Image (spheres, rainbow, N blue to C red):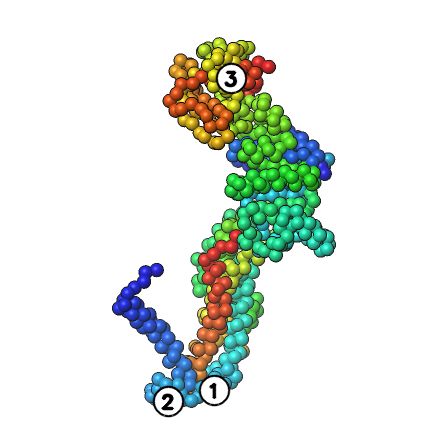
Amino acid sequence: MANVTLRSVRKTYPGGFEAIKGVDVDVGDGQFCVLVGPSGCGKSTLLRMVAGLETITGGEIDIGGRVVNQVEPADRDIAMVFQNYALYPHMSVYNNMAYGLRNRGMAEAEIKTRVEEAARVLELSPMLERKPRQLSGGQRQRVAMGRAIVRQPKVFLFDEPLSNLDAKLRIAMRVEIRKLQRRLNTTSIYVTHDQLEAMTLADILVVMNGGQVEQIGNPLEIYQKPATTFVASFIGAPPMNLMPLRADELKSQITGADGAGIVGIRPEDFVISSETGSGGVALGLTVEAIEHVGAETFVYGSRQREEQGVAANPGELPPGEVIVRVPGVSGPAIGERIRAVAPRDKLHLYTADGRKRVGE
Amino acid sequence: MVEEEGFQRYLAHVILWIGIAIVAFPVYLALVASTQDNAVIANGQMSLLPGGHFLQTYYQTLFVGTSGSTREPVLHMMLNSLIMALLIAVGKIAISIISAYAIVYFRFPFRMAIFWIIFITLMLPVEVRIYPTYKIVADLHLLDSYAGLSLPLIASATATLLFRQFFMTVPDELLEASRIDGAGPFRFFWDTLLPLSRTNMAALFVILFILGWNQYLWPLLITTRDDMQTIQVGIRKMITTTDALTEWPIVMATALLAMLPPVFVVVVMQKLFVRGLVETEK
């Protein structure tokens, strides 16, 4: 049972590359914290610094009230689940789980109790004598989990533990991990690039980009009020539509858009309607592609020429492309012209550099 | 695999049998010669069928030795060869796995320089450095000893390279998992790396054992006492006789006996050997 506190943690590699540029995170006792971000954003590095597998160049990492900057991984009282599981290939499932306990000099009887309990919880009991190569991907994943939980550590660390599983198993394991964590009530830090995993697992969500924290908060709060355009486009699938606001018609539609340079609208906040925006946004679109997912339909439309305004800067989303979510399977046909309307309170306004929300 | 039809298939078999005959005939001849009477062989009237002296020749070879050039029983020579080959094989594996471990898993000053120095010794086999090595061994009073026979042959760049390549394929996460599991460098080596290297060690053992067993020049140089003679040197000494008839049945029997241990090692370890060369267990 422990808090994990990161105080302006930095990591600079000998070559001068700054992987982590000062991160502050506070994970409360028993909380599930998810670090999410695109590849190369430093989330795995940060996790490995908490684990003690990477040195800390600056700042402090505090686990359970003890600064652990100089503490060996084994003495930090943490357990880690790796992306490729890192099971010892030559050891049986039982020995894989028991190894860490044996190294700590625990009595064999106590080890047996703990391993068998973990195996029961993870439904691995019939496989204790097997070698990892005789197990399926999902079973290996559970052994890796078992190895972590028998230790009864203060903190669980997960490094993209589900990314080697197929889609169906991933969802099942995601739920299992969450249930297990709730029951054991152990502080956890979980790294993923999958925003759906992040949303569903997290008590606290940390969105990272380029070695920095973009936003920390409760997942729904982040979804509803993304602090920057990066967070807005990263969290949510399909991503939020971000459109530049210049001295064009779009800007004049929106009330209170002073100082805003970018407007963001989630695909599900659009309604196909003939009404005008009344302070919100109404876009004339030509339907270019349609994706039927079953429960909902995504309509990809391009904005009409006069509404595109000035050509977008390079690096922005495809100019003039807008995604609209329509519930069910009904929807317009390709080539049809539609009007997508979003009310004012569903708009997210940002400064032109996308770093700040405005108009609230 | 292409299935050949009729004639072609028989042709392939005929070629294979010819090949086998070419390889096997001298061995057969040695076996036959070792069962004949020496006088018959010396007359050049040796039959191609086994003679009746099998037990007598092999008894004399193993436990008595030749009456002339070297009076050492071959069993003792074999023991010397066996000890030398085992020391070389085990010693090489032990030294090279440890040095590969240091090179791959530890960051120390001049790590790469040391690696390259080890690598360069590949170009210096025993024959090239034979005089300085002899001098060192002589100065250390290791002539006519098992240590003298094996130590200079133990340091091995090849085996170090092989283990280095293997260690580099072991995922880093295993090391990290071990660190989190509270295993220090020694435990990681002993509990994880050694068991994973098992097939590699077996493959290497086969190669090195045969290499050690077949050493000729080095043992010839540093052993002078008959009781430290290895079998390869012994055979040579048996053939050169000045004032007596070469005892060919005994020479042939010795040659056949010299083949047995390598064959035995290959047969016993064949499975592991092939696995070690082909497959990397992960």
Label 3 to label 2, Cα distance in Å?
Answer: 112 Å
Quadrant of the rendering where the N terminus of chain A is positioned: top right
Q: Are marks 2 and 1 on the same chain?
A: yes
Of residue A16 and residue A274, the one placed in the foreground of this image is A274
Quadrant of the rendering where the C terminus of chain A is positioned: top right
Q: What chain letter is assigned to the residue under label 3?
A: A
Query: Dot 3: what SS?
Result: strand
> Closer to us: mark 2 or mark 1?
1
Residue shown at the point (37%, 77%) measured from the top left: B26
Q: Is residue A210 visible?
A: yes
Q: Which residue is mark 2?
A: B40
Label 2 to label 1, Cα distance in Å?
Answer: 17 Å
Residue shown at the point (52%, 52%) measured from the top left: B282
Q: Which residue is mark 1?
A: B55
Query: Dot 2: what SS?
Result: helix
Q: How many numbered dots are placed on residues in this image? A: 3
- The spot of residue A37 in percent (x, y) is 55, 31
- The spot of residue B232 in percent (x, y) is 46, 74
Q: Quadrant of residue A216?
A: top right
> Closer to us: mark 1 or mark 3?
3
Q: Which residue is mark 3?
A: A342
Q: Residues within 10 Å of mark 3 (few under 14, many from 20)?
A: many
Amino acid identity at mark 3 = Ala
Residue A136 drawn above or below residue A7: below
Of residue A270 and residue B244, the one placed in the foreground of this image is A270
Q: Are the residues tagged 1 and 3 within 8 Å (C-beta)?
A: no
Amino acid identity at mark 2 = Val
